[in-house]
Amino acid sequence: MAAGTAANPGNLRPAVKKMGAFLVILGLGLVVCALLVHRHAQRTGPGESDQSQPMNNWQRAVTLDSKPDYSSSAKAKAEIPPRIMAEEKRQKPEERRN
């Protein structure tokens, strides 16, 4: 049987006391953490804690190419080295072979 059942309720008290103490310590820790965060926010001021400025500058620097040229012209094909062209012919892509 588990500790603290109806047959033996005396075993439950020490565990509840430990859990209660743990919860009190946990609550105090959270309060101290909140106070430290609040104190830090008051001391730094809004100018020092603004981290969005570099990201905004980076986003403004990005430009979109409204008219991209993705056409495959003969000039682009001529830039392919001859050994790659030979390999492409050997694989016979028109027959769907690799």
Image: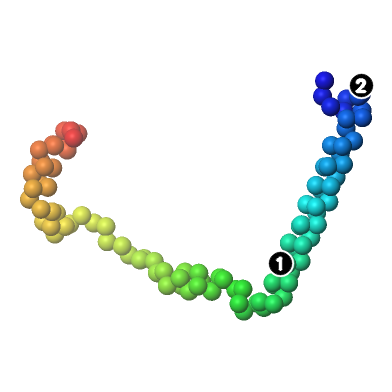
**What element does badge 1 sit on?**
helix
Point out the frontmost of discs 1 and 2.
2
83 and 45: which is toward the camera: 45
Residue 74, visible in the rendered structure: no
Percent coordinates x, y for residue 53 in the rendering:
54, 74
Q: Amino acid at mark 1?
A: Val
Q: Quarter-wise, where is residue 1 in the image?
A: top right
Q: Amino acid at mark 2?
A: Ala
Residue identified by numbered label 2: 7
Q: Quarter-wise, where is residue 51 in the image?
A: bottom right
Residue drawn at point x = 69 percent, y = 77 percent? 43
**What element does badge 2 sit on?**
loop
67 and 13: which is toward the camera: 13
Left or right: 48 with respect to 83?
right
48 and 36: which is toward the camera: 36
Residue identified by numbered label 1: 37
Which quadrant holds the C terminus?
A: top left
